[in-house]
Amino acid sequence: MYIYDTVSAAVNGLKQRGYTMDFNLSENCLVCHDHTFKVEDFEITEFYRFEGNSDPADEATVYAIEGNKGHKGVLVTGYGASAEGMGAEMAKKLTMHKN
């Protein structure tokens, strides 16, 4: 596993290693361009958690995602995002990597 000091360094490092897609979180899936990835369609291969010095709003997690058809990309979420705006299965998959 690599060590990154900032969210942007993690994203850039992952992109240099082939994680070129930018995933967005939807209720029960990840979305990138015209591709949709349900919980069973991808794996989290790496993750990096960043904590703000004084403001919890500065906390984020960067996920390296690999789809079951070879797609590789990055998902960045706020620390509290696991409870907000997503289905239970997606929240479970993402939060198991946060602890």
Image: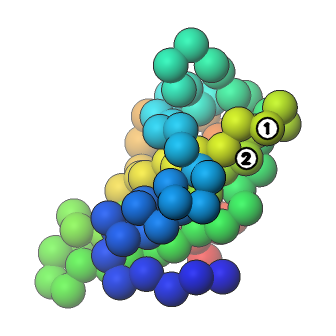
Residue 99 visible in the picture: yes
The image quadrant where one finds the C terminus is: bottom right
Way the structure is coloured: rainbow
- Please identify, in this view, whether the residue under mark 1 or under mark 2 is nearer the observer: 1
For residue 47, above or below residue 5? above
Image marks 1 and 2: residues in contact by CB distance under 8 Å: yes
Label 2 amino acid? Answer: Glu
Q: Position of residue 10 (x, y in %)?
A: 43, 69
Q: For mark 2, give the secondary structure.
A: strand
Q: Foreground residue, 83 or 15?
A: 15
Image spot of residue 40 (x, y percent)? 83, 36
Label disc, if present, on residue 66 of the rendered structure: 2
Q: Disc 1 designates what residue? A: 70
Query: Where residue 92 appears, x then y in whole percent?
Result: 68, 52
Tag of residue 57: none
**Residue 35 in picture, x, y percent from top left:** 62, 19
- Amino acid on which the number 1 mark rests in the picture: Gly
